[in-house]
Amino acid sequence: MEQEQSGGTGTGHREVQLRRTAHGEFDVENVRGGRIHIGTGEGADFTPVELLLAAIAGCSAVDVDFITGKRAEPERFEVLSEGVKVRDERGNHLDDIAVTFTVTFPEGEAGDRAREMLPKSIQMSHDRLCTVSRTVLLGTPIAMRAVD
């Protein structure tokens, strides 16, 4: 049974399709027609590891913005997502992943409410809301297979 395609914040099936464009380069397309180009890091294109860091930061940023933005519009909203790629007995992976939010709100009562909610919203995203970081933290199995 085919699952219904879903986007946004709801539950349901998600997928992206990669198509090779050159050696080590791929176009990625989602079901809504969005497209990005990825590569090996030899050029300006994002690498898959950078996209993972972006996905972690982006997912939490959406959560935090949604929660704090109900209280006040931020004057500055930047997120740094970083980690160290290592190779050890477990294979290649990222270690020491950290996501740092730099967010400022205007002076006043609404800004005060948003500032008060900022650390709580970051924690909520980490603990239960962000699908990307929760998937990494839970260590969800990934099935890989070849078909003709």
Image: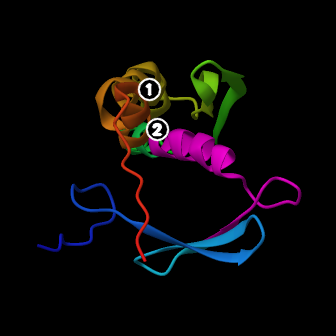
Residue 4 placement, left or right of 70: left
For this view, does 131 lie left or right of residue 4? right
Based on the displayed image, in which of its 4 quarters is residue 31 positioned? bottom left
Q: For residue 64, what is the image quadrant?
A: top left
Nearer-the-camera pick, 93 or 118: 93
Q: Are marks 2 and 1 in contact (CB under 8 Å)?
A: yes
Q: How is the image coloured?
A: rainbow
Who's the residue at 19% across and 72% down the image?
A: 4
Which x, y percent locates residue 21? 71, 78
| Mark 2 lies on residue | 60
- Point out the image quarter for the C terminus: bottom left
Q: Residue 119: which quarter of the image?
A: top left
Give percent across and percent down for residue 83: 68, 27
As drawn, the residue found furthest toward the right would be 42
**Label 1 sits on residue:** 122
Q: Secondary structure at mark 2?
A: helix
Q: Amino acid at mark 1?
A: Ile
Q: Quadrant of the N terminus?
A: bottom left
Residue 43 is a magenta residue: yes
Which residues fall within the magenta stretch? 36-61
Residue 33 visible in the shown view: yes
Q: Secondary structure at mark 1?
A: helix
Whether 80 is drawn above or below 19: the answer is above
- At 39% across and 21% down in the image, what residue appears? 123
Q: Relative to residue 70, is residue 42 depicted above or below?
A: below
